[in-house]
């Protein structure tokens, strides 16, 4: 490599620090070196601080004045610790993290302690690490989701600590059991030190906003028209009940979301009150997700979720749960009954296409949306029975289904259904590939324009609270805070 090529490949900041290091080692002042190379001290200072890239002729003159070769400036010994720290911090100040924090670059004076430089670089590195964790890649998010599902399976989707917390809160407000009223939800809020406020301008990226400074919980004024107002209140309060801190990773964000939804379900359908009812229904061979929904005035999805929390632990019934978008994409899944759902190479079920012959897909073709749909499905891993319903959401229609192995069907209403199907849903040739005749006729003669679901691209936003525009939240709180 020629000297010119070396100069182009070497960072101006490093060259400048190396010049200063050699100069100070020889006891030469900036003014003395500037005089020797016939340059103003201010010009040489800009070279030493890396603010000006020296020309090759200038480097040759500086090298002669310092009594070294030009290679000593370009490829010499490593910088000393102080110079290395200064170079690293100056590079950091030019990077994205400092800009994102609104910190303008500053001159690193000699009086700044070396320990202070180390501390600033350590903080910069930690901020970068947290930003990388929060900006989870699809693979990282799927891996975190798989690990969380494995935890849920090991515990039969039953979290005793959350059940105990729900019991504690309900006892504190004197809830006798049965359906939780809106007034009781308001009493829980008051017990936790919050007043409820409905606002028409709630930030679009939020379901609720808690003003911790003033004990105010804001909800959208359109919530009662869209869904269960109790659920919105309890979900907002659950994070406070559980003492959640700002999530430090996508895995922690997922875990907090599961805990929040679980505690909300446990408050709406208290364990101590519902388990005797479920045991009685099992004894009568009349378990019904619809009956559970109606008894506690909750959505079908909430009832189905809650059943999976309690079925294995209290009824000794392994179960599976699926939520499937009308496009066929699995959006939520749980199983501990050996059902063999399709997965990616990481083991993630969410995001996979559900078999079109499985109950969760077949139910979309049913005209009767008033009554539940039941179906037996033969698989390569045995026969399963499922009950399913279709529900509307802001993202379109979804089916929600709960299923069990054939041997446990005897405990459920709907076991006498005549509907049967055959699914090898973990095998691609089952239905994820078109029949050979159709594929042969159309594969080279078609070109669909993919309609990518908005939720697919919005699954992994960055930030401490993925998907939330914090500027909107802070401006909202500023506008609504009591004066």
Image (tube, rainbow, N blue to C red):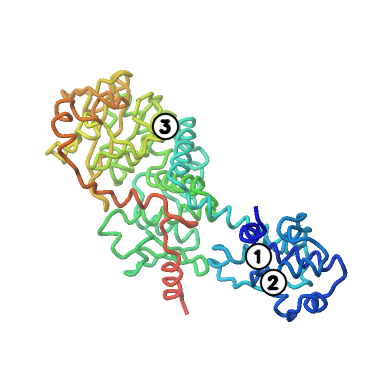
Q: CA distance from mark 2 to mark 3?
A: 53 Å
Residue 70: mark: none
**Residue 161 in the figure: left or right of residue 42:** left
Cβ atoms at labels 3 and 1 below 8 Å apart: no
Which residue is denoted by mark 3 in the rendering?
Answer: 345
Q: Residue at x 79, y 72 (%)?
A: 111
Cα–Cα span, label 3 and label 1: 46 Å
Residue bearing mark 1: 12
Instruction: Residue at 37% x, 32% y: name it.
Output: 343
The correct choice, above or below, for 372 with respect to 316 in the image is: below
* Spot occupied by residue 296 in the image (x, y as percentages of width and height): 32, 44
Task: Specify which label sits upstream in the sequence, 2 or 1.
Answer: 1
CB contact under 8 Å: marks 2 and 1: yes
When the figure is inspected, residue 207 is found, relative to residue 40, above or below; the finding is above
- The quadrant in which residue 182 appears is bottom left
Question: Which is more foreground, mark 3 or mark 1?
Answer: 1
Q: Which residue is mark 2?
A: 47
Q: Regarding mark 1 in the picture, which secondary structure is present there?
A: helix
- Callout 1 crowding tier (Cα within 10 Å): few <14, some 14–19, many ≥20: many
Coordinates of residue 221 in the picture (x, y in percent): 31, 65
Disc with the residue nearer the chain's start (2 vs 3): 2
């Amino acid at each position: 490599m020629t000297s010119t090529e070396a100069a182009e490949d070497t960072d101006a900041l490093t060259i400048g620090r190396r010049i200063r290091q050699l100069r100070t080692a020889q006891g030469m002042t900036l003014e003395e070196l500037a005089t020797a190379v016939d340059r103003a001290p201010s010009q040489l200072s800009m070279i030493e601080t890396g603010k000006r890239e020296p020309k090759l002729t200038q480097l040759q003159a500086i090298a002669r004045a310092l009594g070294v070769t030009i290679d000593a400036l370009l490829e010499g010994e490593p910088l000393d610790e102080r110079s290395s720290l200064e170079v690293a911090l100056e590079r950091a100040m030019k990077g994205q993290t400092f800009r994102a924090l609104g910190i303008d670059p500053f001159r690193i004076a000699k009086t700044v302690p070396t320990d202070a430089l180390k501390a600033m670089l350590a903080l910069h590195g930690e901020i970068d690490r947290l930003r990388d964790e929060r900006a989870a890649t699809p693979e990282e998010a799927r891996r975190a989701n798989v690990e969380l599902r494995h935890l849920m399976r090991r515990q039969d989707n039953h979290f005793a600590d959350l059940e105990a917390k729900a019991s504690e809160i309900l006892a504190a407000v004197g809830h006798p059991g049965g359906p939780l009223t809106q007034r009781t939800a308001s009493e829980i809020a008051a017990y936790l030190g919050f007043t409820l406020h409905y606002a028409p301008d709630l930030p679009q990226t939020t379901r609720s906003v808690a003003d911790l400074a003033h004990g105010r919980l804001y909800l959208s004024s359109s919530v009662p028209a869209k869904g269960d107002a109790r659920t919105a209140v309890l979900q907002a309060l659950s994070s406070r009940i559980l003492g959640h801190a700002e999530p430090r990773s996508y895995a922690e964000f997922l875990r907090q979301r599961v805990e929040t939804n679980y505690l909300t379900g446990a408050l709406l359908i208290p364990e101590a009150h519902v388990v005797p009812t479920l045991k009685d229904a099992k004894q009568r061979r009349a378990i019904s997700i619809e009956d559970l929904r109606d008894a506690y005035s909750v959505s079908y999805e909430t009832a189905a979720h809650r059943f999976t929390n309690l079925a294995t632990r209290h009824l000794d019934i392994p179960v599976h749960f699926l939520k499937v978008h009308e496009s066929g994409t699995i959006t939520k899944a749980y199983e501990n009954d050996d059902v063999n759902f399709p997965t990616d190479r990481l083991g993630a079920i969410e995001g996979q296409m559900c078999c079109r012959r499985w109950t969760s897909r077949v139910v979309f073709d049913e005209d009767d949306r008033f009554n539940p749909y039941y179906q037996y499905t033969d698989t390569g891993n045995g026969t399963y029975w499922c009950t399913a319903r279709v529900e509307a959401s802001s993202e379109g229609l979804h089916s929600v289904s709960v299923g069990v192995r054939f041997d446990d069907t005897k405990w459920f209403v709907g076991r006498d259904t005549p509907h049967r199907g055959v699914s090898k849903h973990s095998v691609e040739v089952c239905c994820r590939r078109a029949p050979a005749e159709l594929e042969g006729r159309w594969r080279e003669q078609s070109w669909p324009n993919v309609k990518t679901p908005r939720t697919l691209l919005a699954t992994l936003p960055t930030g401490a609270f993925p998907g939330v525009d914090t500027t909107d939240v802070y401006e909202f709180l500023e506008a609504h805070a009591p004066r």
